[in-house]
Structure formats: structure tokens, C-alpha cells
Amino acid sequence: MKILSKPSELREFIEQKGIKREEIGFVPTMGYLHEGHLSLVRKCRHENSFCVVSIFVNPLQFGPNEDLAAYPRDLDRDKALLEKEGVDLLFVPTEQDMYHPDFSTSVKETRLSRYMCGAFRLGHFDGVCTVVLKLFNIVQPKRAYFGEKDYQQLQVLRRMVRDLNVPVEVVGCPIVRDHDGLALSSRNVYLTKEQRQEALRIPKALEEAERLFKEGERRASVLEAKMREVLSAGKGLKVQYIEIRDADNLEEVEEIKGRVVVALAVYVGKARLIDNKILEG
């Protein structure tokens, strides 16, 4: 596995090897890898002859009171996992490699990013779009792989690629859950044993919404109320939002008629956890 940190070195390496864009699959990550990330890597390797993974904790997508400094990191462990998965190239830039001291250009999506996480993490998706577009320009992949746990991010990036004519196929991959049903997240490491038990109310709330839906309930407000009921029974859970929105354009839905995403963000202790489930009428 080749490991590089400079954007110019990465481009030079790919050009010297004669690797074409059509051969390149790409998995952007912030590191501290878990099975969810590795599932993206495996799909990338299966569908492309050259697999690139990046690890970069992007400061632009963290707010002033968020966990940038505390975000979990273990580069040696990540390298070993990616080596085992057969990754061809690992790109590990520094902040200086990615952003010049007088960096002053950003990418802003103005519609899908207004809702859900975007309503509470102002500027977050500007940071996501900016760094992902930069990484796309550096790596120049044919396909890029993202987890559906970050569903709003996935839709925002699909919109960015469409609107800016970026020649990259954004591939969404299913949520990977632990044995107890909790969606895998690097931030799960923040949870104490007791908090993790309480966090299981998050997938349970989604399951309850799905159960009501399968029984014929189509009013979004009823599903949301049931989810709040499940979560409010827990200790130390703070619901930031529960929303049911059109799965494609993220517009608010009152009565479910088509495909929707049921999404929520919940604080469990200091850990902000997100999860979602797709329902289709």
C-alpha cells in the first residue's frame, strides 16, 4: 500500500503508473476506522481496479464548540486495517497540505443542507462539500463511496456533483450496525457502558416507526411522536431532532406517500449520534 500526503505527489504517482480515471475508486474518511468504513473499502475494491482511501480530519466541517480536538485518531491502526484490506493507495494529508494559510474559497450547497443536521451545525456542509470537492480534484476518481448513515451528507454530495458537473459517481452504501443494532460510528468510543445501553433506544425508535408504518400509519407526526416516546424513556438522552423527509430532495413530509428517510440526531452524554431508516410506501 502506497502512502502519500502531498496532493502533487499523489497526482504524480497516479500519472507515472498510467492509472486512468475509469480505474479509480475512492473512499474519503476521517479515520478511526470501523467495519462501516471497511465495508466501503471492500465495495470500492470489488468495483474498481485501483482503490484509494483518504484519512483527513477536516477542520472546516467542525463548529467552534464541536469535537475537532477530541475526535478519535489512531493512524497506525488505520494503516494496518487498510493494508489488510488490500488498499492500493492511502492519502493522509495534513491541514497545511489541504488548506493554504490564506485559503478563501469554499463550496456551498443552499437547499438540502438547510435541514436536519444543517439546521444545527451551521457551516458544516460547506466544510464537507469543500473538502470533498478538493479530494475529488486531487484523486480524480470515477466512483466515490459514502455510508448511508450520513444520509443528508450523501444527498448533499450527490447534489453538488450534479450541479457542478463533477465527473464522479457518488455511491451510497448500507448502514453497518453492531451486534446490538447500534449504527457503527467513530464517536461510539465516547460512550460509557451505561450510555451505550441507553443509545440502543436510537435504533429501537427507528424500528418502532417502521413497525407503525408497516401497520399502515402514514402520518409523519404520529411516527415522530412514537419515536420521541421511546427516546424520552431513556436516561441522559437529548434529542436534537427527529424528522421525516422525502428521501431524494429532503423536503418535509406530512403524509408518507413515497420513499422517505426517517432521521434523527441524539446526544448520548457528549456523543452526538445520528441514524436513519428508509421507509417506502
Image (cartoon, rainbow, N blue to C red):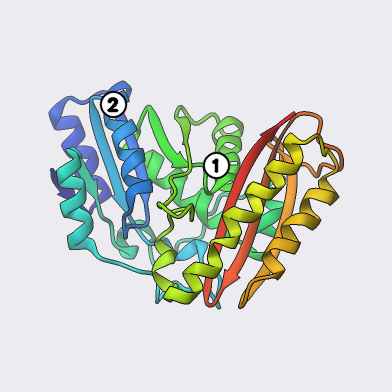
Mark 1 surroundings within 10 Å by alpha-carbon count, few (fewer than 14), some (14 through 19), many (20 or more): some
- Secondary structure of the residue carrying tag 1 is helix
- Give the numbered dot on residue 46: 2
Identify residue type, mark 1: Leu
- Mark 1 highlights which residue? 154
Distance (Cα) linking label 1 and label 2: 21 Å
Under tag 2, what secondary structure?
A: helix
Cβ atoms under marks 1 and 2 closer than 8 Å: no
Residue at horizontal 48 percent and vertical 56 percent from the top: 182
Inspect the image, locate mark 2, and give the three-letter code of the amino acid beneath it: His
Q: Earlier in the sequence, mark 1 or mark 2?
A: 2
Q: What count of labels does the image hold?
A: 2
Q: Nearer the viewer, residue 94 or 38?
A: 38
Q: Residue at x 35, y 69 (%)?
A: 72
The one of 229 and 258 positioned closer to us in this rendering: 229
Q: Residue 58: x, y in percent?
A: 42, 61
Percent position (x, y) of residue 37?
35, 47
Q: Residue at x 34, y 64 (%)?
A: 95
- For residue 189, what is the image quadrant? bottom left
> What is the quadrant of the N terminus in the image?
top left
Question: Which image quarter holds the C terminus?
Answer: top right
| Relative horizontal placement of residue 49, taking residue 31 as reference (left or right) | left
On screen, residue 111 versus residue 171, left or right, reads right
Q: Residues within 10 Å of mark 2 (few under 14, many from 20)?
A: few
Query: 257 above or below 263?
Result: above
Q: Residue at x 75, y 63 (%)?
A: 229
Position of residue 214 measured from the top left corner of the image (x, y, whole percent): 73, 35
Mark 1 or 2: the one toward you? 2
Residue 116, image x, y percentages: 69, 55
Reply above or below: 140 against 219: above
Depth check, front residue: 192 or 245 = 192
